[in-house]
Amino acid sequence: MAPSVQSAPAGKPRASANFYAGATSGLVTTLLLQPLDVVKTRMQISSHFGRSVGVNNVLHIPDNAGVLQTLRFITANDGLVGLWRGIVPTVTRNMTGVGIYFVSLGKISDFL
C-alpha cells in the first residue's frame, strides 16, 4: 500500500507552495530590476567613492553622469548583458529570502 501524503488543511496552501511562490516572485523581481541596480551602483562608483579608491578611470563613466548616460556607457562597454552583471548572487539571495518570507508569513497567519 502506498504511503499517504500529508496535505494542508482545506483552503490553506502547503509551506512548499508558499516557498515556490516566494522564490518565483524573487526571481521575476530580480530579473526585472537588476539593470536598475547595476546602473545605480555604477553611478555611485563614478562619483566621489570612485575617485577616492581610483576605479572611475577603469569604468570610463564621467563624474556625476546621469542615468541615461551611465546606461549608454554600460551597454557600449559590456553590451546588454552587462546590465545583468552580478545576477547570480542576487537571484540566489532574493529567491531564498523571499521564499522563506512567504513561508513565514503563511505560518504566522495560520497561527494568528
Image (cartoon, helix red, strand yellow):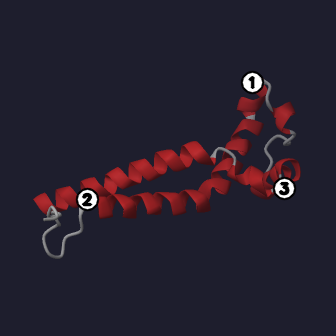
Of the numbered discs 1 and 2, the one sitting upstream in the chain is: 2
For residue 77, which numbered disc appears in the image? none
- Residue 24, located in which quarter of the rendered image? bottom left
Q: Is residue 112 visible?
A: no
Q: Amino acid at mark 3?
A: Arg
Cα distance in 3D space between marks 1 and 2? 48 Å
Of the residues tagged 1 and 3, which is closer to the observer?
A: 3
Looking at the rendered image, the quarter that the C terminus falls into is bottom left
Say which residue label 1 marks.
52
> How many labels were placed on the picture?
3
Residue 26 locus on image (x, y percent): 47, 57
Cα distance in 3D space between marks 3 and 2? 43 Å
Say which residue label 2 marks.
15
Q: Give the camera-side residue of 52 and 14.
A: 14
Q: Residue furthest bottom?
A: 11
Residue 64 locus on image (x, y percent): 79, 44
Q: Residue at x 24, y 68 (%)?
A: 13
Residue neighbourhood size for the residue with mark 2, other residues' Cα within 10 Å, grouped as few (<14), some (14–19), many (≥20): some
Q: Residue furthest front?
A: 1
Q: Amino acid at mark 2?
A: Ala
Q: Give the camera-side residue of 52 and 4.
A: 4
Cα distance in 3D space between marks 1 and 3? 24 Å
Q: Is residue 9 left or right of residue 15?
A: left
Label 1: state its secondary structure. helix
Of the numbered discs 3 and 2, the one sitting upstream in the chain is: 2
Q: Is residue 101 left or right of residue 32?
A: left
Q: Residue at x 75, y 24 (%)?
A: 52
Residue neighbourhood size for the residue with mark 1, other residues' Cα within 10 Å, grouped as few (<14), some (14–19), many (≥20): few
Say which residue label 3 marks.
72
